[in-house]
Amino acid sequence: MELIIFLIIGALAGFAAGLFGVGGGTIIVPLLFIVFTQMDYSPDSIMHLALGTSLATIIVTSISSLMAHNKKGAVMWPVFKNLAPGLAIGCFLGAGIAGQISGLYLQLIVGVFLLWVAYKMFFGGKKQVVGHANDVAGADTELPSKPKQLAAGGVIGIASAIFGIGGGSLTVPYLTRYGVVMQKAVGTSAACGLPIAIAGALGFMFFGMQQQVDVPNTIGFVHIYAFLGISIMSFFTAKLGAKVAHILSPELLKKCFAVLLTVVGCYFLFKGLV
């Protein structure tokens, strides 16, 4: 029965990710929080399990997304190489930081983050960086020095672990800020999701085992059944969501998703404060 529930979550998360063009973490974390709560897991572990499991599932979806973007030549590999070490180290450490934060405070932090994403989706998106005309490989963009990119990767990695996301909400704005065209920012962000997801999942496993989480079918803060069910279904339904997205109005979709995230964000804040 558990596996069926997680397959349904995976189907919804994948479809929504493809439909709205956002990482599955913003969908997976709230859904897992609700399911784990209904399963009467320890309140101190629920949020950590949702975050760790979300990052683990992003390993599979990021590989699929990375391959698709790489075929279109949208991944700036030199930039990826500069960001990746910081992303991996930051996300692993971020898992350790998240492990020290109480489940209650994590709820509030994620709730505020979801409201921020909702705000950006509802009011943002109109000003897109066009980039340079000859920016085929991203060579004409003026990105910061390698040490600064490494440091930026560390910050994005830490935040990604605490929010349970693949980092797209943070990496894309960072790259477009320095003149990277939107398509390449999204493609490079998709590649960056892989080191974030791997390091984050390993971090939540490691630090979760240190705390001896008393929940069945888990390795640290990663729920194995949830990981398998969500990964399998989201891989297929993301493509379906992307097809439907081309039929409907992108602006309407973004606004609908922003409303959904606002409701979920308020739910987290309400649960955390009451």
Image (spheres, rainbow, N blue to C red):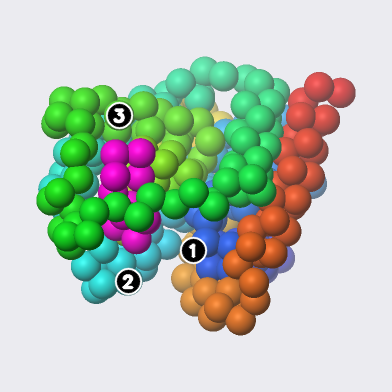
Tell whether 20 sits left or right of 260: left
Please state which of the two labelled residues, at mark 3 or mark 1, is closer to the viewer. 3
Name the residue rendered at 26%, 63% in the picture: 74
Q: Is residue 248 above or below residue 195?
A: below
Quadrant of the frame with the N terminus: bottom right
Image quadrant for the C terminus? Answer: top right
Task: Report x, y in % for residue 226.
Answer: 57, 56
Residue 107 in picture, x, y percent from top left: 68, 30
Let me know if residue 181 is in the magenta part.
yes
Name the amino acid type tagged 2: Ala
The residue depicted at 24 percent of the width and 73 percent of the height is 71
* Residue annotated with mark 3: 152
What residue is drawn where x is 58% and y is 62%?
A: 20
Report the residue marked by disc 2: 68
Q: Can you see residue 62? A: yes
User: Residue 174: which quarter of the image?
Assistant: top left
The residue tagged 1 is: 231
Q: Which residues are magenta?
A: 176-186
Judge by depth and name the residue closer to the eye, 88 or 148: 148
Q: What secondary structure do most residues of the magenta stretch adopt? A: helix
Looking at marks 3 and 2 on the same chain, the residue that comes earlier in the sequence is marked by 2
Residue type for callout 3: Ala
